[in-house]
Image: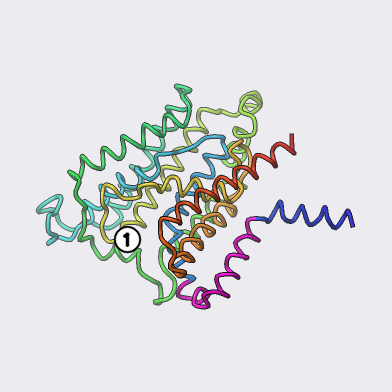
Amino acid sequence: MASSSATFKNIVRKYGIVLVLLLMIILLTIVRPEFISPRNLFNVLTQSCIFGIMALGMTFVIISKGIDLSVGSVLAFSGVVAASFAQMSDATEKYFPGMPVLPVIIPILLALGIGAACGFVNGWLIAKTKIPAFIATLGMQTAARGFALIYTRGRPISNLVPSLTALGERVFNIIPVPVIIFFVMIVISHVLLNKTRFGKNTYAIGGNITAAEVSGVNVSKYLILIYTFCGLLAGLAAVVFAGRVGSVHPGAADGYELTAIASTTIGGTSHSGGIGTIIGAFVGAMVLAVLRNGFTLLGVNAYWQKVAEGAIIVVAVIIDMRKNAKRD
C-alpha cells in the first residue's frame, strides 16, 4: 500500500501539470462539446503560438536562474521595424514611400536580428556588469517599447505583403502555419536544451554558477548566448504576430512577457534554477490557452482570466518551492 501511495505521488509530482491539462480538457468537453472540435482545438494551439514561442526562450533564461521582462517590448520593436519593410507598394501611410516590395526574407531577418541584438544587450549587461537580470531586462523593456513608439510615432504599421500575412494562414486549409512554426521551434529548442553543450551549460549555470565556473564553463559567454536566444525567439514571435494580425502596433504584446513567464513556470521550470523542460513550457502554454478559450466559450468576463492566470502562477511557484524544500 505504501509503495502504491509513493508511486502515485511520484506520478503526480512528475506529470501533475499534464493531468491538470487533461482534466481541463475533459471538463470543458463535458460542459461545451464544441471545445473538442478540430477547428477549436487548432484555434487553441494558434492562440498559444506567440507567447508559446517566447516561453521556449524564457525556459532557457529561467533554468539559468534569470528572468527576461523585455520580450514583449522586443516583439513590438522588432515587429514594427519588420512590418515597415514589408508593406505593399500602394499601402496607405507607407513608412518608406517609393520603396519597392522587398523579398519577405528581409523583414523576417530584420525582426530576428533586432530580437537577437536586444537579447545580446541583456545578456552582456547581466554577464559583464553583474546587475540583476530583473533590472537589466526591465530597462530593455522600457527602452525597446520607447524605440517602437519613436520609430512609428505611435502609429500602427499595416497593409503588409501577402507573403508575410501567409504566415497567419492554414496549410491545406487545415493546419495553421503558426502552429507548424511553434512545433518546429519546440523540437529545435528541445534538442538545444538536451543534446548540446549549450543546454548542458544552461542547466549547470542555473544549478550552481560557482561550480559551473570551477568546472570550466565560460559563464559570461553562455549567459550572453542564453539571452540572445531568448531575444531571437521574441523576434520570431514578432514575425508570427505580424503574419497573423496583418499589422503591428508599437503597443503590441503588452504583458506578453508575463504570459511567457507564466507558461514556463506552470510547466515546471524552477525559478531556483537548474530545473525545467521545453515540453513543460509547451504544456504550460497550453494550460493558459485552454483556460482562455474555455472562458470565452463559457462566456466568462475576460477580466477574470487575468485573476485566474495570476492564481495559477502563484500556486505553481508555491508547489515549486515546496518541491525544492523537500529536495534540500
Image side of residue 49 versus residue 78, left or right: right
* Residue at the (29%, 63%) spot, across then down: 165
Residue 42 in percent (x, y) is at: 46, 70
* Residue at the (48%, 23%) spot, across then down: 130
Q: Which residue has dot 1 on it?
A: 243
Residue 48 in percent (x, y) is at: 46, 59
Q: Main secondary structure of the magenta part?
A: helix
Question: Relative to residue 256, is residue 272 depicted above or below?
Answer: above
Image side of residue 22 versus residue 8, left or right: left
Is residue 138 in the magenta section?
Answer: no
Question: In the rendered structure, which segment of residues is drawn in magenta?
Answer: 17-40
* Residue at the (51%, 75%) spot, across then down: 32
In this rendered view, identify the residue nearer to me: 233 or 289: 289
Outermost residue toward the top? Answer: 129
Image side of residue 268 versus residue 240, left or right: right
Q: Give the position of the C terminus as an image quadrant.
A: top right
Question: Relative to residue 91, is residue 59 depicted above or below?
Answer: above
